[in-house]
Amino acid sequence: MNRVVILAGHYGSGKTTVAVNLACRSAQSGKPTVLVDLDVVNPYFRSADSRKALEAAGAELVSSNFVNSNVESVWLPAGFVEHLEDDNEQVFVDVGGDDGATVLGRYGIKDCDFWMVVNPYRPLSAEIRMILELRKEMEAAAGLRFTGIVSNPNLGRETMPATIAAKLPMMKALAHAAGLPIVLSCVPEAVPFQAPLPGEKLPLTLYTKEAWSIYG
Amino acid sequence: MAEKVLMKGNEAIAEAAVAAGCRHYFGYPITPQTEIAAYMAKRMPKIGGTFLQAESEVAAINMVAGAAAAGVRTMTSSSSPGVALKSEGISYIAGMDIPALVVNIMRAGPGLGGIQPSQGDYWQCVKGGGHGDYRNIVLAPSGVQEMYDFTKLAFDLADKYRMCAMILSDGVLGQMMEPVAVSASDAPPFCADGKPWALTGTKGARKPNIINSLYIEPDTLEVLLDKRYAEKYAACEANEVRWDEFLTDDAEIVVTAYGAPARIARSAVTAARAKGIKAGLLRPITLWPFPKVPLAQLAETAKAFVCVELSKGQMIDDIRLAIECKRPVSLCTRTGGNVPSPEEILTAIENAAKEAV
């Protein structure tokens, strides 16, 4: 894994969940770790909502001062560049959905892993051709080439082992068509998935639990 | 066979509209409903539809009125301050008897308020909002699947009654992601064939249709209004009332809530039952027409009602009217963009149970 890992993907592909999990795991292994919230698209459900979990794990969160404040607009956080230049730190960057990757162009990052998070249960990334089209848009917006795919097939709280298994052939075909490796395969913690997975298995802890999700 | 996908509530509304044959969307961005417009911007050009970001909310609703008059399925969406701006157009749509869908993903008000969820537009949407005597059909989904299902239903009801139908939802439901069973394929664009009143061009073969909301002569306008209330709105009240009940059969404390708070209220009712309190939940699905009859029936056996809403006591008026103030109704509310916890609602249920003894 490169010292700087940037996570981009379609809206709702799970970028923030993956980024928070990777940052917590890295910090827990003892590495100085920073999670940078570069989402300038959506003011709801942000990595800043997981601040407590990140702090408990020992990871630093770099997020705009305006997030969850009285400004109905999202801004780039100060202090990101100094973390890019600190060779001792593991840095994860959570980018906004789709063309939210445009913000990356401003930083001119050269040496990094740029991973595309994919959930094929999302309707606008349900087919390989759609994902390849999104890839092209995101790469053009970011001025970066993807270096890997994070496979994250899930139906939220209804995810079963079969939910994941059903989409593995497609994820492998996508990796082949895109000429990219599957670097991580996500499995929600509560899902007992035992079969082999492409890439490294990343168990996902869902850090944000909301009152309205306790239903029926 | 319906396939399951993972969707945001806002996306589910947009995708359902496409599946219902809507090919004309006019809107203007505002948090927390912008995904509807963003989704339509991507989807419509690919299926020969029209996505147009208007110069304002007022322009968007008038474009909807124009498209609706031409007989196509059309919609707009916004959040609270934007729906306030659309109110004039909604009144004109009612005055012209044309079908349209307006979606309100409510945020906290008044004024610019906040961007977090609220239900402060209950009066605005359920009681009209614009000027004049009129009604809108108002549907309140409580999950992402219902955002999808009720959007299709809203188009059907709008066409059936030639009225404005509204989806009244909130920032929680607009933004949350849940699995949704969607129809396998897109329906063809809805055509105006079944709408003999629509402005489709006479081709020299019939008298021109006229769609208008201006009636200068008092008697003409009064007759029209009387007919609208006696036929159209009465038919809605007779046929289109929808609601959901949970553990109400023997309920002594009846909780009422719609939208996202109904999900939390359901957890609180379950918790109250575990503590030996006979609690139940009535969730209005149509806010107009309002489920007056089932509420009045529950008032015969229940001891008290608890109204949960993300507003300072708006729906509670309709609860009191429905039960003709026969039982005490207490208000459990959070505002400003906050939502109550299950524990807060449980406390409200416990207090109502104590006072009812």
Image (cartoon, coloured by chain):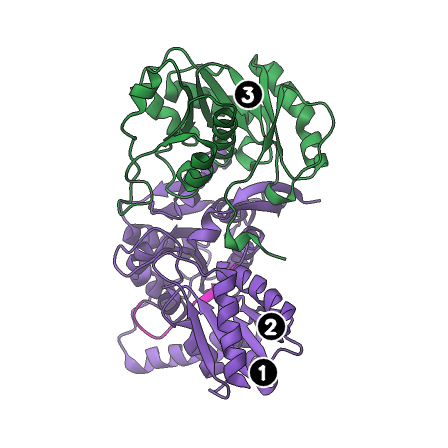
Chain colours: A green, B purple
Q: Residue at x 65, y 71 (%)?
A: B247
As drawn, the residue found furthest toward the right would be: A195
**Amino acid residing under circle 1:** Ala
Residue in view at x 32 percent, y 62 percent: B87
Upstream in the sequence, badge 1 or badge 2?
2
Give the residue displayed 35% in from the left and 75% down from the top.
B133
Q: Amino acid at mark 2?
A: Gly
Chain of the residue under the numbered disc 1 shown in the image: B
Nearer the viewer's eye, disc 3 or disc 2?
Answer: 2
User: How dense is the environment of label 3, judged by Cα within 10 Å: few (below 14), some, or many (20 and up)?
Assistant: many
Question: Residue B188, located in which quarter of the rendered image?
Answer: top right
Whole-percent x, y for residue A197 in the image: 68, 23
How much space separates mark 1 and mark 3, taking CA atoms? 57 Å
Q: Are marks 3 and 2 in contact (CB under 8 Å)?
A: no
Residue beneath disc 2: B280
Residue B145: x and y, percent? Answer: 58, 51
Would you say the residues marked 1 and 2 are in contact, meaning their CB atoms lie under 8 Å apart? yes
